[in-house]
Amino acid sequence: METTGQVGTEVPAATAGGQQAASARRTVDNFLLAPFPWYGLDGAFTGARWLLQAGTSAEGVVEHGSIGHGDEPSLRADARDGADRDRFAVVITVAASPLRRTADGTGVLEATSVSSAAWLAGSGLLAVTWPAQMDHSLRDDWLEQQTDTAWVLADDLGSDDWASLTLPVDGEATPFHYRESEFGWVLAGSTREGVHLGAYGRGMSAYGLGFSAVKDIQEYA
């Protein structure tokens, strides 16, 4: 961003560092409020790990959140020939919740399911995807259309669009629904700990992944 002719627009490094630390602290605090265990890749993955945002209900209850592994994905408007520049996997933990009424009794909250995890994973992958050769002005329309498609796919996990994949969760073989696209891969399943898992990635094979409960989420800050 141009700052020529403006006085005092640069944030001092120490101040910027303090803001980043405060933001990271808030993110960790949100994760710590969750009444369910968080999941990430197991100890076989030795690369970088980082927190995304935790999602909350209208009443402020943490319902889901994401943990990243590898490179932090970024939109690449100048990507050509579909070349992948990032290698990452993001694991989404979704609290298993039944159909229930809102706290004020005036409405109903939908139940969460494996489809919830699949849709969050599919939309997450799309959010960090920029198809090669696509004009900037067209991406919002493309993203809306593709997100709608991701919802339709997530709502029908028994369709031919999904394959079966078995991966270890806390050392136990667990079935997942899995699909690939030109933008990356998406998978979703459930754990015995009462949560649903979704994941998406690019540049890293899903076939060699394993998942485990995070012992100390603060280590990811």
Image (cartoon, rainbow, N blue to C red):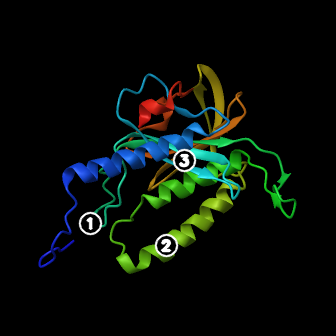
Tag 1 secondary structure: loop
**Label 1: which residue?**
78
Residue type at the position of mark 1: Asp
The image shows residue 151 at horizontal and vertical percentages of 65, 61
Residue type at the position of mark 2: Trp
Residue sticking out furthest to the right: 105
How far apart are the two marked residues, 1 and 3, measured between alpha carbons? Answer: 24 Å
Going by the image, does 4 lie left or right of 183? left
Residue type at the position of mark 3: Val
Q: Is residue 86 visible?
A: no
How far apart are the two marked residues, 3 and 2, measured between alpha carbons? Answer: 19 Å
- Nearer to the camera, 64 or 24: 24
Q: Earlier in the sequence, mark 3 or mark 2?
A: 2
**Label 2: which residue?**
142
Tag 2 secondary structure: helix
Q: Residue at x 47, y 60 (%)?
A: 127
